[in-house]
Image (cartoon, rainbow, N blue to C red):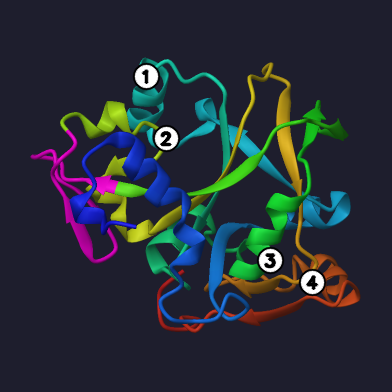
Amino acid sequence: MKPFKELASADEIIDYQKRVLSRTGGRKADEAQLYHYSNILALKGMLDSGFMWLSPVDRMNDVLEAEMIRSAGIKDMNFACFSRTNQSIAMFKMYAPNPNGVMISISVSDAKRMLELKPRLVENDMVRDEVDIELYWMGVCYKDIETETITTPGQRNSRIKKPLKELAGAVKLSGWDYEKEVRLCGRMRLYPEQRLAVKLPERINVTLCPGFDRESNRSILSKLIENGIRYEESKYEGWIRT
């Protein structure tokens, strides 16, 4: 496949970004990890149900991207967000703040296996039957705020004329590039009370955010141990003010 900088159409960029799990930086798929920043109550919900939920566009915190997706006529995109960055202070602060934040890590090999099962429909927080749609992983590329240049780790491309529109759902402004985002996506038009759910991998690891309140969350931490899930403190514990 051509390198990112030589791709000349939006379809080529999308296809390249859908191959994100094949680019693991030389590490084996069992060793390479993806990271989901969240909170301990959301993690408890995943463990209780056995599923991770995919959110629709209207739940995005990037208002500009949400508007660009809608303006491109896309009304059926749902996704769960992961990162290739392990223990980002910025992402702890934004998505997994103290005293209840956690970072969930899964291997790339398990991420690939998540695509083998059909997702489920969620209605009013209840997981229902399977739906006949395919899931796929999508790497996010980033657009320079002043030019039409887009980037993906280590590569740049300036061949797409209107990337925010042509690559809607796979591009964000470069101010978000620290996230190194990877999305688990499913395309299905849903009602407001509905979401999609995908089976949570059996093998997950959990890192507690800096300043995590162990005392208040003692029962949930015990549940992690009962489920054979290893958790550890952040390497930044005690190093940043919480």
Specify whether 71 is left or right of 182: left
Q: Position of residue 138 (x, y in %)?
A: 48, 48
Name the residue beneath numbered marker 3: 110
Q: In this rendered view, identify the residue nearer to me: 82 or 116.
A: 116
Within-10-Å neighbours for mark 1: few <14, some 14–19, many 20+:
some
Image-quadrant location for residue 26: bottom left
Q: Position of residue 197 (x, y in %)?
A: 74, 41
Q: Look at the numbered disc 2 and give the secondary structure of its residue.
A: loop
The Cα atoms of the two marked residues, 4 and 2, are separated by 35 Å
Measuring 63% from the left and 78% from the top, which residue is drawn there?
30
Which numbered disc covers residue 49?
none
Name the residue beneath numbered marker 1: 72
Q: Earlier in the sequence, mark 4 or mark 1?
A: 1
* Position of 194 relative to 4 (above/below): above
Q: Is residue 106 visible?
A: no
Specify whether 38 is left or right of 52: left
* Position of 46 relative to 197 (above/below): below
Specify whether 201 is left or right of 20: right
Verify CB contact (< 8 Å) between mark 1 and mark 2: yes
Q: Earlier in the sequence, mark 3 or mark 1?
A: 1
Q: In this rendered view, identify the residue nearer to me: 44 or 138.
A: 138
Q: Earlier in the sequence, mark 4 or mark 3?
A: 3
Q: Amino acid at mark 3?
A: Asp
Within-10-Å neighbours for mark 3: few <14, some 14–19, many 20+:
some
Which numbered disc covers residue 221?
4
Within-10-Å neighbours for mark 4: few <14, some 14–19, many 20+:
some
Q: Look at the numbered disc 3 and give the secondary structure of its residue.
A: helix
The residue segment tinted magenta is: 142-160
Q: Amino acid at mark 1?
A: Ala
